[in-house]
Image (cartoon, rainbow, N blue to C red):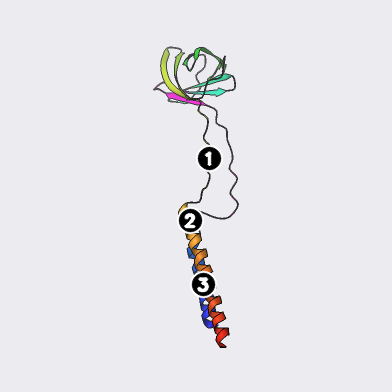
Amino acid sequence: MKQLNALFLGIVIALPGWAGGDSSDGHTHAAPEAVLAVAVAPRAVATTEEFEVVAVVEGTHLMVYVDRFASNEPVSKAKVEVEGAGLKGFASEAAAGTYVMNLAAAIPPGKHPLTISIEAGDTADLLSATLDTSVATAAAVHVHSWSEWMVWSVAVLVLLASVTLLALRRSRRKARGL
């Protein structure tokens, strides 16, 4: 009986080691935390010594945000011309530093080069950007690797072999009358 208790105690002590210990690799069996899904609109970013521009596709509009690079203050009353991705025309000012250009048709998925021309007072600049309208990739799904499955399989096999050997040993002792 002492041997049975020792074997059982050994299996109980060794089992967490076979199963990955204390899950120190970051893997837990708790419920996964909720992931906030944030939709990011397609955008293009460009900077020069004078200006910083962010162009964002919002529905049927291309929003162009223009700021001074040095001070980050919005650029008002500027002439903003956008060309590329099937677009060509001027964006009208909607608010300080915000310019809007209507889109005649949806921009197809992909990476499209844009040329943005800005004239603000006595300063003019030409910026190049890439508008990325690619479909966002889904988050990676947690997949168990073959080595993790192998560890669990070996642990189960060792446990089954131990139980089988104990049962055989016990039945032989009973047969001998010990």
Q: In the image, is residue 163 above or below residue 93?
A: below
Q: Which residues are magenta?
A: 25-53
Q: In the image, is residue 168 above or below residue 20?
A: below
State the CA–CA distance, disc 3 to disc 1. 42 Å
Q: Residues within 10 Å of mark 2 (few under 14, many from 20)?
A: few
**What amino acid type should be assigned to the residue bearing mark 2?**
Glu
167 and 25: which one is in front? 167
| Name of the residue lying farthest toward the left | 49
Q: Secondary structure at mark 2?
A: helix
State the CA–CA distance, disc 2 to disc 3. 21 Å
- For disc 1, the marked residue is 139
The magenta stretch spans residue 69: no
| Name of the residue lying farthest toward the bottom | 177
The answer to whether residue 42 is visible is: yes
Q: Earlier in the sequence, mark 1 or mark 2?
A: 1
Given contact means CB atoms under 8 Å apart, are the residues at marks 3 and 1 in contact? no
* Residue displayed at 58% across by 84% down: 174
Q: Main secondary structure of the magenta part?
A: loop
**What amino acid type should be assigned to the residue bearing mark 1?**
Ala
Total numbered labels: 3
Given contact means CB atoms under 8 Å apart, are the residues at marks 1 and 2 in contact? no
Q: Residue 113: x percent and y percent?
A: 44, 20
Q: Secondary structure at mark 1?
A: loop
Q: Residues within 10 Å of mark 1 (few under 14, many from 20)?
A: few
Mark toward the viewer: 1 or 2: 2
Q: In the image, is residue 89 above or below residue 108?
A: above
- For disc 2, the marked residue is 148
**What amino acid type should be assigned to the residue bearing mark 3?**
Ser
- For disc 3, the marked residue is 162
* Residue displayed at 55% across by 84% down: 173
